Image (spheres, rainbow, N blue to C red):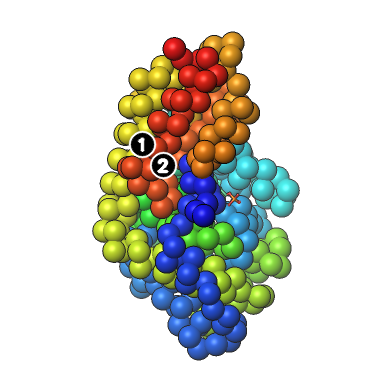
Amino acid sequence: MSDKLLFTPGPLTTSATVKQAMLRDLGSRDLEFMQVVREVRAGLVQVADASPDEYTAVIQQGSGTFGVESVLTTAVPPDGKLLVAANGAYGQRMAQMARVARVPLEVLTFPEEGPVDPQAIARALAADPGITQVAVVHCETTTGLFNPVAEIARVCAAGGPREALPSGGRSEAEPPQRPRQLIVDAMSSFGAVPLPVGALGIDYVVSSANKCIEGVPGFSFAVCKKSALAKTKGWARSLSLDLHAQWRGLEETGQFRFTPPTHALLAFHRALAELAAEGGVEGRAARYRRNREICLAAMRKLGIQEFLAPELQGWIITSFRYPPHPRFDFPRLYETLSARGYVLYPGKVSNADCFRIGHIGRIDAAQTEGMVRAMEEVLREMGVIA
Ligand SMILES: *Cc1c(COP(=O)(O)O)cnc(C)c1O
C-alpha cells in the first residue's frame, strides 16, 4: 500500500530511495556519518550558488522554525536591532521570535496580497541607523508569493545614507553608506527557486530538510557568510540554538554538539544526489512549475479562484479562495480527498477563507492530474459544480 500524496508545504512526499537511505544505524562519531555531514554541508553551499571560501552551511536539529530562530537570535548583536519585513504568517513568526528573545525589533507589515516593498525597507534603514539586520521571507508560504529578495539584498548592501548615522563626524576612511546584513527565510523555496546567494551577498539563508530538497523532517540549516557568522561568538540568546557554537563544533570536531538526526541526514544526503540528478535547482523548478500549471488550469476550469493576482504567484504553493457556494465545505473536501489519497492543506491568509495546494515534493504531472480529477469529482458530489 502506498501512502497518500502530500500536496502540502511539508512534510512532503519523498522518493522510495530517500526513505530507503534511512535503513541504517550509524553512530554520531562514525567516520562514515561524519563524511555524510561534510558532504551535505558542502552540497548546501553549492545549492545556494555560493563559494565555499566565503560561505558555510550549519545544520541545526529541529524543524525549520528552529533554524530561523537560531539565526535571528545569534546574528543580531547585543546592541543591534532587527528589521522584519513581513507580508504573511511566516514573516510575522520571525517578528515573534525576536520579541520572545527580547531582540530589539522593528516590523514593517505589508498586505498579504502583495510583495514586500524594497523601497520601504530603504526608507526604514535611512530613518534608523540602529538597524543592523533585515529579515524577510523568500517564498511566503501563506500565499505562495515570491518576495523580491534580489532587490532587498541590493537595498541592504547600499545600507542607509551615511548622513543618517549619529554623527561623531565623518571620517574619510568610512564608507558613505553602511551596509546592513540580510537574513532570508528561504524555507519553502531553497532548492527549487534560483537564488544566487553569493552574488547577492546575502548573509544568512535558512531552509529545512523536508521542503524542496525532498528529505525527511529532522533538521534545518543555514547557509551563512563566514565573515558575518565569525563575529557572532557569544551573541546567542539560547544554548541549543547557538548558531556560532554549532558551526564551531561542526568545524572543529566534525560533530554535532547534541544528538544528531542521523537518519534524517542519511535521507538528505540521498535527496541532494537526487536533486543533482534532476538537473539541480533549475530542473526541480521545472517539475514544480509543470505541477502548478496543471493544477491551476484545472482549478480555473472548476471556477476556483486564486488568492493572489497571477503575476505575483510563485510555483511552490497556491492559495485558493473558498468557492462562494453554500454547499462548499472545506473539512469535507479535505476528508474526502484524503480518503482518495490526496492531502491538501488549510489556508493561513488572515483576511480571507482559503485553502492551499502545494506543488512540491516527489510528485509529478500525472499525480497532479489525478488529484485535480478527484477534486472535480468531489466538488460535483458536494453539489458545488454541476
Ligand atoms: C515551512 C516554513 C517554515 C518552518 O516551518 P516548520 O514547521 O518549523 O518546519 C518557516 N518559514 C516558511 C516560509 C515555511 O514555509
Q: Is residue 92 left or right of residue 122?
A: right
Residue 290 versus residue 241 in the image, above or below = above
Frontmost of labels 1 and 2 is 1
Vertical side of 296 occupied by 56: above or below = below
Query: Which circle's residue, 1 or 2, is located before the other in the chain?
Result: 2
Q: Is mark 1 within 8 Å of ligand 1?
A: no
**Residue 289, horizontal then vertical, whole percent:** 32, 41
Residue drawn at the location 48% of the way across and 76% of the way down: 37
Q: How many marks?
A: 2
Label 2 is placed on what type of residue?
His
Work out which residue is located at the far bottom of the displayed protein and give it. Answer: 31
Q: Residue at the spot x=60%, y=84% of the render?
A: 27
Displayed quadrant of residue 88: top right
Disc 1 residue crowd, few under 14, some 14–19, many 20+, Cα 10 Å: some
Q: Is residue 369 above or below residue 228?
A: above
Which of 86/332 is in front? 332
Q: Position of residue 138 (x, y in %)?
A: 44, 44
User: Observer-nearest residue: 175 or 183?
Assistant: 183
Q: Quadrant of the C terminus?
A: top left
Q: Amino acid at mark 1?
A: Glu
Residue named by callout 1? 369
Q: Would you say the beta carbon of the disc 2 residue lies within 8 angstroms of ligand 1?
A: no
Residue 91: image location, x then y, percent: 56, 40
Residue located beneath label 2 in the image: 359
Between residue 147 and residue 74, name the one nearer to us: 147
Q: What is the spatial separation of the Cα atoms under label 1 and label 2, in whole angstroms? A: 12 Å
